[in-house]
Image (cartoon, rainbow, N blue to C red):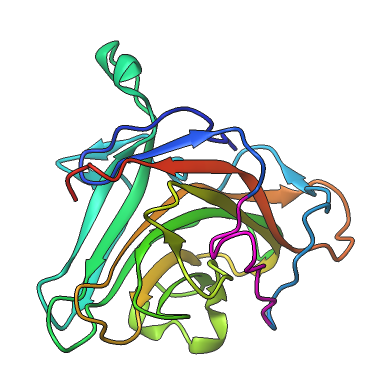
Amino acid sequence: MKVRRVCALVLAIVLCAVAALPVFAGGPDQPFTKWSDTKLDPEFPHTGGGVSYVRNGAFDAWTNGKPDNWSTVITQVQDGMHWAQIDWADAHSQGLGLHNYALGLFALCNTTKAPGYGIAYSPLNVPKTGDYWAVVHVTAWGESGGGYNSVAWYAIYNTKDPTKVPASAWRELYPDDRVCWNESGICNYLDRSETVHIEKGSYIFLKAEMKYAAYNAWTSWAWDDIAVWDMGKPDVGHKGFSDDGDVTWNRNAIR
């Protein structure tokens, strides 16, 4: 798994990964909210490793503006949501032909209805049904218009149809009540890691949504460094969120 700690210039969204002290999404006075399907445990040891069963989990490979091996859909009630290719590399690196990509989704509420949601999904090539170590990274920026409006999840389920993923299979990815403030210029790069029982033939799904209407509210999500590994040692019950660095925001970027 690659951890992003370099400056970012993005085609549709601009971020910058740097090594810094953790800054939680709602600001230093708003700690993470604990969810029923996980727990905050930043000191847990990673218990997986080796070759990942997620194809293009680093989003390095793109063709015609789409991430290779990933399908993307948007269910929207208004024209205010689109996918974006994020490049974590700084301008100098890009000038040398060096890139470091991630998957982005932008949502804007420009009517009296919420924008809808986007889903990206990819087949997993796990060799057999069993327990695996799953890791997903996400960050989110915006002016969400209220608490718990901009949300993100991932799911691993034995289907290739996003509409057939049951509600119980979705795992919360962004555990704070608000996305990072655009004005603050810094946000945490969250890592959710845990043991997941995976059936052979399953797919991995990413989902993000602005749940309700808040006129002119917007959110930019970014996913990267997604891996499913064999268990490196017996499961010791650790799971939860950790901060793998911080990202800074270019407020002048075109979105």
Q: Quadrant of the N terminus?
A: top right
Q: Position of residue 53 (x, y in %)?
A: 55, 48
Residue 18 lies in the magenta stretch: no
The vertical placement of 4 against 152, above or below, is above
Main SS, magenta residues: loop
Residue stretch rendered in magenta on the structure: 23-35
Please name whichever residue, 158 or 136, is drawn nearer the observer in this view of the structure: 136
Please name whichever residue, 129 or 28, is drawn nearer the observer in this view of the structure: 28
Please name whichever residue, 52 or 241, is drawn nearer the observer in this view of the structure: 241
Q: Quadrant of residue 74?
A: bottom left
75 sits to left or right of 170: left
The vertical placement of 109 against 96, above or below, is below
Q: Residue furthest top?
A: 96
246 sits to left or right of 85: right
Taking the spot 62% from the left edge, 69% from the top edge, the residue there is 30
Taking the spot 56% from the left edge, 61% from the top edge, the residue there is 27
Residue 29 lies in the magenta stretch: yes
The vertical placement of 38 against 235, above or below, is below
Residue 149 in sight here? yes
Q: Quadrant of residue 205?
A: bottom left
Residue 161 in sight here? no
Q: Position of residue 217 (x, y in %)?
A: 26, 72
The vertical placement of 211 against 109, above or below, is below
Taking the spot 46% from the left edge, 80% from the top edge, the residue there is 147
Q: Position of residue 82 (x, y in %)?
A: 19, 61
Taking the spot 54% from the left edge, 61% from the top edge, the residue there is 25
